[in-house]
Image (cartoon, rainbow, N blue to C red):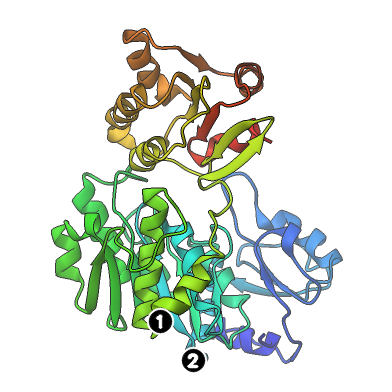
Amino acid sequence: MYSLRKIANWLGAECDRYLPIASVAIDSREVEKGGIFFALRGEKVDGHDFLAEVASKGVFAAVVEKGYRGENFGMVLFYVDDVVGALQEIARRALLERKTKIIGITGSIGKTTTKEFLYEILKSKFRVQKTFGNRNSQRTLPLAILNAKGDEEFLILEMSMTEKGNIKNLVRMAPPEIIILTPIVTCHAKYFQNLEAIAEAKMEIFTATAEFAVIHEKSAGFAAVMEGCTCEHVIYHQDLEFPSPFSESHLTENVTAAVEVGKYLGLTIEEMALSSKRLKPFEHRFEKRQLRGITFIDDAYNANSTSMIAALQNLPKPKEGGKTIAVLGSMGELGKYSFVSHLEVAKEALSRVDILYCIGEEAKPMVEVFEKKEMPVRFFTCYDELKKVVHQTAQDGDVVLVKGSNFHKLWKVID
């Protein structure tokens, strides 16, 4: 890790203490003794309110806003104009001192699963690290960089965005040499006029450092993508040179992207085939869970119309005499695309499920589609009632899909 003095220098501050920093945190629950805490201001909480708590846990220093006038609680305080900007700058400076190559993954869907698959394939031959969970934002990606060991040959970074310029900020910290661009679809579309605008924003991931890219065929269909990609590249779908460990088409696509990077880095098909045996869906991403003879598909981490339809199309068949139940939460951050996106999902669900349960105001168009066809459907406003009804309705031999935008936390229906 880095000394307190070096971090102070990167921030343009003065500090003569050589204390080694053990870790970097933005959440008071995750701080470690000997670490440094960044007091970020959020919509609901202010990191400055937790300085006493982190100090009691042995944190050496904290980065705070210049306007902070409270106590230091025995810590070294660094005063900055922008705490998020300071966090990103430290991450950028840290990477400049390493020989690590960056693999950047962006797109609308499949980023996390592709990242996990790629990590499993590469780790048998290389020193490799990755972003943990969904730490892919302006505030959390720097943590993945700073809390890595620093001796990795490859660092796999998932990069997300909600509006134009987000990816640009991330690649300023960590410009990738290798890029994976997963499908670009209607997702987090609230701040964009159309899909081409989303594609243009995603292309901020390409900088002068890019040497190789793996691009999904859906993304390759955008003019901005093919014009913006100036490095060697391949276009992928789901055609593997060895059998996929999954029968689901969307998971096989994620494997294909990872395999293409492996091939570029010199791994043989045989080596990757061995690694593929360890692959499994990431948490809340099409996880199959058997409970009381019921097959629950936990795909509840997030949702857009493309991933919803993919989940419906890849559902396993119920046992003879069993039924298929879909528990679908509304899809958020779709802006003007919300109504038509929910309509598309409902039309697909008509031929895929026997019973539909929905929650979230934006999901009402799905309910109306089922009602018009006189198909079993129910709209809920209470999570506890939803869970109760699911557990009363689902029986041995049934298949239950649980999927919705992350804020619903629909995996609790299963838990």
Q: Amino acid at mark 2?
A: Lys
Residue 387 place in picture, x, y as percent: 64, 23
Tell me the residue at 59%/69% (across/down): 143
Residue denoted by label 1: 268
Q: Residue furthest front?
A: 320
> Distance between the Cα atoms at labels 1 and 2?
24 Å
Q: Which mark is residue 322?
A: none
Q: In the image, which disc is placed on residue 99?
A: 2
Badge 1 or badge 2: first in the primary sequence: 2
Residue 308 x %, y %: 39, 37
Residue 331 seen in the current view: yes
Mark 2 is surrounded, within 10 Å at the Cα level, by few (under 14), some (14 to 19) or many (20 or more) other residues, namely: few
Task: Give the quadrant of residue 148.
Answer: bottom right
Query: Which image quarter holds the N terminus?
Result: bottom right
Residue 68's quadrant in the figure? bottom right
Q: Secondary structure at mark 1?
A: loop
**Which class describes the residues within 10 Å of circle 1: few (<14), some (14-19), or many (20+)?**
few
Callout 2: SS: loop
Q: Position of residue 296 (x, y in %)?
A: 58, 35
The C terminus lies in quadrant: top right
